[in-house]
Image: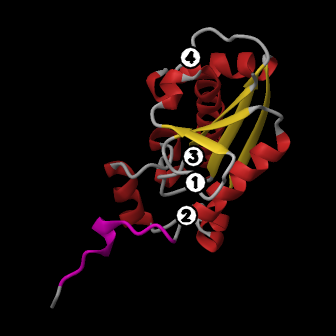
Amino acid sequence: MLICGIDEAGRGTLAGSLFMAGVVLKSPVSGLRDSKKLTSKKREALFPEIIKNSNYHIFSASAKEIDEIGLSALLQKGLREIISNLQADRYIFDGKAKFGVEQLETVVGGDNLIDEISAASVLAKVSKDREMIDFGEQYPEWGFEGHKGYGSQSHIEAIEKFGYSPIHRRSFKIKKLQQGSLF
């Protein structure tokens, strides 16, 4: 039975793209687990091994698309695109939401339980991290190569100092930046 594992990276970031990957392993890859539990070096080493030993599809949506179309609609689009591009008997997405995609199964914590989801997690995370490192070179004021677009204190401070960059998600509201005086 062929399983297509699906995971995403960058859903909650303030900047950059959303990445989703689907993976159908053709042969085992050792060392797989949730990408967040692997070092950057280990993820980078696993990336070509996963590519070599799988059929895969990577979907991405830019910050501009997220602002214009919405995150949920793009998650649904990505899931459907992966399913249409990869042949499998089962499609299993890490988490609990199906985003209206009926043939999808979900497993909370699947990136630690199912190798195909772990592999998808690595492909999505490495793709996201590489993008943010590139953006760090283009927009050095915001330090994207360090926080990868997540809402860290240094990232919020950079937004306060420099405003939004062209790759920030304008539709994501940052509480600290929304707080104002009542008077």
Residue position for label 4: 42
Distance from the alpha carbon under mark 2 to that under mark 4: 30 Å
Magenta stretch encompasses residue 80: no
Of tags 2 and 4, the one toward the viewer is 4
Quadrant location, the N terminus: top right
Q: How is the image coloured?
A: secondary structure
Disc 2 or 3, which lies upstream in sequence? Answer: 3
Mark 2: amino acid: Ser
How many numbered discs, if any?
4
Q: Quadrant of residue 21?
A: top right
Residue position for label 3: 136
Q: Which disc, if any, is residue 139? A: 1
Residue 53 versus residue 43: which sits nearer the camera?
53
Q: Residue at x 49, y 49 (%)?
A: 149
Distance from the alpha carbon under mark 1 to that under mark 3: 5 Å
Pointer 2 local density, CA inside 10 Å: few below 14, some 14–19, many at least 20: some
Q: Which disc, if any, is residue 165? A: 2
Mark 4: amino acid: Lys
